[in-house]
Structures are given as structure tokens and as C-alpha cells.
Amino acid sequence: MDQSAILEMHGVNKTFDKVVALSNVDFELKQNEILGLLGGNGAGKTTLMNILFGLYKMDSGKVLLSGQPVTITSPRDALLKGIGMVHQHFLQINNFTVIENIILGSKVSQPFTANYAKEEALVQKLCTQFSLEIDLSARIETLPMGTRQKVEILKALYRGVKVLILDEPTTNLIPQEVDSLFQTLKIMVKEGLSIVFITHKLREVLSVCDRISVLREGKNVISLTRKDASDDMLVRAMVGEGMDLKNSVIFAEGLVSDQKTNKPAILNVKGISKINADKTQAISDIDLSIHEGEVFGIAGVAGNGQRDLAEVIMGIQPSTSGTVFFGGEEITKEDTKERISRGFVYIPEDRLADGFLNKVSVAYNLILGYHHLAPYSNKGFINWKNVKKSSKEMISEYNIKTTGPDEIGGNLSGGNIQRVMIARAFSQNSKLLIAHNLTRGLDIPSMDFVYKKIKTQSATGVATLVISEDLDELLLICDRIAVMYRGKIVGILTRDKFEKYEIGRLMSGYEQSQEETGKGK
Amino acid sequence: MTQIKKFLPYFIAILAAFLAAGIFIAALGFNPFKAYETIFSTSFRTPNGFIQTLIKWVPLTLLALAFTVPLSSGKFNIGAEGQMIVGGIGSAAVGIIFADLPPALLIPLIILAGILAGSLWGLISAWLLYQFNINEILTTVLLNFVSFSLIDYVCTGPWRDPAAGHPTTIPIGENGFLPMLIDQPPLNIGVLLALVATVGVYLYTNKTTAGYELVVTGANPRASKVHGINIRQMFLFSMVIGAALAGLSGAIEVSGTHNRLIEGMHSNFPTLGLIIGLIARGKNQAVPFVAFFIAILEVGASAMQRTLLIPVQVVLIMEALILIFILLSDLIRRRQK
């Protein structure tokens, strides 16, 4: 059927400092369609949509809404014009109820009382219309991620948007919730909305979108309908000509390895528990063993104790009880520095806060944690000659864009800061790598590069503990996956037993599969 | 080019400060050009002027380092004043009690006593921070007040010099006087000690592994902790080193400059030390140079008051203006980004 465009953007340009984020990008959204905006990290998807939502100002270009040129000056302005956006990180007040969160910031019928009956009825009507099952009087903090996202969608619907932008909406969802989200999107389109679905996941666009636009390095690559799209085409469009797909981990082989459990276990964690200062249980009774050369994954919705587990294994936080063995020796009492000397390497989740030094040079950053080991340190003195030499090697091998080892860290862009972390972690003679959200923020070729590094390392016997919220990533690279829920390990699966929906069930706290909730494919 | 770009904001800030202070001097009814000529020429016109500048440079550098070394790890030592005073007390005590020891023994003992006493005074705050996480700004400032009472007690107590009109102790033993580098005009070896301390701080923070840990702790304590650095130990170390430097300056004042303990001998050096540390933006390497510049202003200021009758406070205003304009230039640069 022939649809008219509800939204068009023409010749959009945007630069940040000296970085070109978007150059001459065109964009078109038709009436009643789900458009997949596909691209790797740094492709410019989110920037383009943030311009549409009034968060950024474009340098040049124009926006047409139903054929009429408009200027959108702020998110409020965008909402007035019928454009809504659901961000990756929800903007919600945890101890407010659903209805309070929805009407927050909008006009209410009785501003001097807390009587929202009228608004509640309206929201209830929307829930029925879009078949969203939400308890409006529930407090936000008690709800799972999938439901919280529906609250965000309801917020936009309540404000009467015609166009809804969803930025990487599946990031924190378990597979069952993803299915349910896609159902909702289809109903919304039927009810007259038009949807932009930003993602870097190929399978998702192919399963739900009517049309697909691919961006790469801030430029349009292709736009086509789902009928005309194929896996290969989209992959090529996303990564460009430069990448060798046949030998890539992501698109060709995965990280399958053989019989690693035959090798001796190098890390043994026995009955580790940690109780926070406020008496809450961060992690409880964790048993793990990781073998040499094994890639061991930990899946789970963010905030279920993954970070505490990583920090206890690294010796950054003390455990309340339990023991840690490494290569047969008990190391429970050793501090982080001693563990690093044993060959522990850690890539923390929060890169900027826990891993990067803005105020000092790139060289200082590249040796952090290993500064007390040879060849960087010699009898209490830093050997700056060696540091400079290694820094230069790392800068070129890991393609860090900087003027040199002496540049101040704070001048680097986000992607380059990532590369510094990766370079630092992979340049060590490590025995155990603990990586939390290893590839967050990396573009596809860089992701593949990191996976290959892990593969080479594990071939030499390095054990890897990957903690990730991206289930697809874990399924791709891990030999075994453990699922964490509320500080406990609720299941460990070996590669031959990997099943997305089963892991999804574990992640949401069901001990065993109770019934077939989410429909399989 | 990049070097010029780096220093340009400082030149502009200093120029702006002189301009603003010049207007102020003119408003007071004096000739600003004459005032500036006096300020800048005094240190270089006569040997005595230059040596006066060097003598002022010693405590200014040490007290500024007492502030910037802890700052390298992210901690604020506002207690250099008290640490200097207590250092001076320690030196005076050793110098009076062991007055008869030979110089080869007594001089090192006096210096050591100053460093030790200053360190101990700083250790109180450092330990409270290490053990109980008590804010170091608070404790260092409060301990300053305790030190005022302490020096008052020492200068008016059993060691009081009854001949002096001001709270002062009797002189330390002559064997404890710092040796002279130049006799006329007099310059003692304190300037060498300060130079050694400056170089030592530079080597420590830039070349050693422990110094690396100090600097990265200041840059991001959380990331440093995650990467195996004992950051609380770094806080403790840096505070004690800073206090030791302040103690050293107290020792030099007692055994070199005054040969006795005088209440109020710290003058406005500790405050100027803070200003120097801030103008140097906390960079240890920049401190000796900034301190020299401020020493020139200070010596010039006294001359200006003597010859032109312009109040010496004008120079303090100027120093504050330089600091304000440098902070302002930081702000402008951040806005431009």
C-alpha cells in the first residue's frame, strides 16, 4: 500500500567539536509503519533522533512534519508536535506510582489535590486500547524492566504522540519481554501511530520492522523494505566494505571451543556472600569454577549483584563469607594489587568512574594497575622509556585516536576511551580476565576485534569471565553461562544447552520453566 | 605554538591583575607606573634585594608544596601554618636543650626535629582521615588554632626571653645556626634545603612508582582503588609529606632566619603558600617558579611602601587579583569548549 510520509528530515548535518556525527543525512518515516533505524555504535542513529526530539540542534538541514517544515526547539516542543521518545535509560521516579510517573509534568484536572481519578480513567482507557497490562497503582521500583518500559510508552501515548521513537528498547529486556514489546508495537501501528525503532540488532529489525534504514559513520547507507532486505545485505551495510566477514567472530563462527572443562579449573569461588552496609544481601552463596581457556558468562538483568561478584573476585570489596582459590591457592585475603600481580585483569562496568583518569595523560592511563610490574616499574621507579614505548605500540595496535602518549586523557572521545581500556586489559600477560559489559559502546569491527582477542587468549589458557546484559553476546562467545538473580546464581548452562527463552526465564527469577510463557519462534 | 597557547592565559591574567591594581593605586592618588617600577626593580637592582627575594622564596616554596603535595592525591592541607609553627617549636626545643652539641650534630638534629614535629602535627589530621574518614580540611584548619596557643605557651613560658618586647624564646645554641652561603648580605643554606626539597618532590611524584600512585589517586580515586592502589594510604602519605615540608620551613626560620622562635614569625607566608599553590594549579613543578614571582612582589612591596608610601597591602590585593583572573581564564576556556 502506498503511504504518505509523516516525517521527513533532509540534509541533516551535525558536528560535535571536530567530530562529524551526521553528514547530509536524509530520513523518512511513513504513516503507520515501524521503521528500523539500524547501525553500529557511533553510526549516528541516536544523534539523529535526539535532533528530532529537540535535544540537539542540527548545524544544517530541515525537518518536515506531514509535509510542513517545522523547527523543534526542545523535547517539550517535540511532544506538543506529537513526537515522543523512549530513551535507553528510563526517566522515572522510583518511589512514585505508575500513574504519578505518567502524569508528572502534564496538566492535571485538579491541581490542588492528589485526586487523579480523571487522569487514571484516561490512562486505563489507553491501556485497554493498546492491550498494555499495567497496575497503575504499583510503585515503579517494584516493576520489572519490561513493564517499566511500557510505562514510558504509556507516558508518550498519554501525551497524544503520533510518532514514537524507541532508542535501543530491547537492551535491558529478557527475550520474553522483547516478544511482548513487539506485540505492543504492532498494536500501536494498527491504532495509527508511526514508530522509529533504533537498534544495532539485525534479528530484531527483521522480525518487527516494515522498513529498514541503515546508517554508518553518520551517513545514509541504504533504505529498503523488509521484503527486499536480507541478512547479508544489512550486515554489509552496517559494517562497510573494510571488514572481513568470513573470518569474523560475530557473523561467521562464534567462539566455539573444544572440551575446555577437561582443563584444570583455575578460579574456584566457594560459598561467597556479601552483605552491604545497609544489611541487604548483595550476593549470596556463590559457587563458581572457571577452567583454563574457558569463556564463562554471567547473564542477568542489571543490578542483580554482578558488579559485587566481580569486585569480590578482584579483591576490591571484601566478602562477608566464603573462599576464593586461584590455581589451587587460597587468595581470599589478598588485596587487589596482589591479585593483579597473579594475572588478574579487570574491565569495570562503569568505564569513566572506575577505569579512566581524565586529568592525566594517555600513558598514565595505559599502565594503571600494572604500573608496579615489569617492564613499567623497576625497583620502585617507573621506567618511563618502557612506558612510552609500550604506549605507542598500544596506540597503534588498538587504533586509539590521540596525538600521543602525552595527551591528556580527558581530550579523548568516548570510543577512544573504550579502546584505552581494551588496550590496557589485553596487553597484559593475564591468567584471568574479568570483563563487565565488555563491548558496550564499541562499533561492530571493534567488537569483533575484541572477540578475536578473547579467542586468541583463551587458546593460550587464559580464563575469561564475561558479565553482560547482552544475552546475544553471551550466547555468541561463551562456553558456559551462569544466570544471576537477586545475588544468587540460579542456573548454569553449558553451550549445548543454550536456549534463549530458558535463560530469559532464569533471568526473571523463575526457578524452573513453569509453563511456556513467551512463545518460541 | 602549543606552549604559547598554554601560557597565554597566564600572561593575560597577570596583565589584567596589574591593570586592575594599577587603577586602584591611581585611585589612591599614587603613580602606578612608579609603583610597578619599584616593585619589579627592587629584587634585581641590588645584591641585597636579590638575597631578600631568595630568603622569602624559601618558606613560600616549602609552604606552597605543603599544600600541593597532598593536593596531588586530592586532599586539601590547609594546616601548613600550624605544621610550620610546630616544626619551629620542635627545632627551637632541640636547639635550646642541646645547645652545646657540635654543629655537625646539632644542625642536622634541629632540621630533623622541625621536619618530625611538623609531620607529627600533620599526622594527627592524616590519621583521623585514614581511620575515621574525618574531613582533612576541617582538622588541619582547627589544628592551626591549637598551634597558636602552643607557640604562645612556649614563647612566654620557661624559655621566654625577658629582654624581648614580644613573645620570643631565648636564642638557640650558636652551634645550631644554619651555615652561611654568603656572609654579606647574609644568606644561609636554607635556600639549598628548599631546592633539595623541591627536586625531591619532583622526583617522587614524576619518577617513582609510589609517586605515580599518588598522582593517579588524585586524578580518580575510585579508578585507582579498582586497579589495586591503596588510596587511603596515599592520602595519609601525601598529608604527612606536606606537613614535613611545612615543618622544614619552620626549622629554617628558627635556625636560619631568626635563630630563635618568635611568635608570629610565620608572617603571611602560609596564606601566600596557598595562593601560590592555587596559581600553580596544584602542579608541584610550577610551584618554585610561581613562588619566586610572588617573592619578587613581596620584596618590591616593602620597598614601595618605604620609598613611595604606598600601603604594602596593595600587593596582597594584586596577588589575589592574579589568582582570581587565572581562575576566571579557566572558566572562560571551559565555556569555549
Image (cartoon, helix red, strand yellow):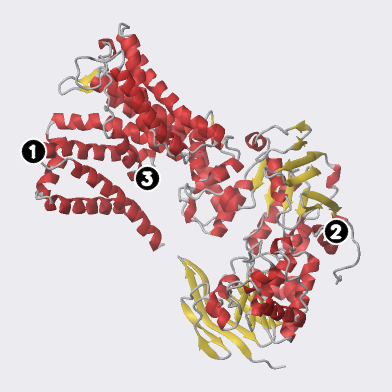
Q: Position of residue B189 (x, y in %)?
A: 27, 22
Q: Position of residue A43 (x, y in %)?
A: 59, 69
Q: CA distance from mark 3 to mark 1?
A: 34 Å
Both labels 3 and 1 in a single chain: yes
Can you say whether B244 is above or below B229 in the image?
above
Between circles 3 and 2, the one closer to the viewer is 2
Going from N to C along the chain, the mark reached first, 3 or 1, is: 3
Q: Which element is circle 1 on?
A: helix
Circle 3 crowding by C-alpha within 10 Å: few under 14, some 14–19, many from 20: some
Q: Which element is circle 2 on?
A: loop
Can you say whether A304 is above or below A248 in the image?
above
Q: Is residue B213 left or right of residue B319?
A: right
Towards the viewer: B183 or B21: B21
The image quarter containing residue A120 is bottom right
Q: Which element is circle 3 on?
A: loop
Kindly identify which numbered label has been placed on residue A431. Answer: none
Amino acid type, mark 2? Tyr
Kindly identify which numbered label has been placed on residue B307. Answer: 1
Kindly identify which numbered label has been placed on residue B281. Answer: 3
Q: CA distance from mark 1 to mark 2?
A: 89 Å
- The residue drawn where x is 83% and y is 59% is A503
Towards the viewer: A278 or B245: A278
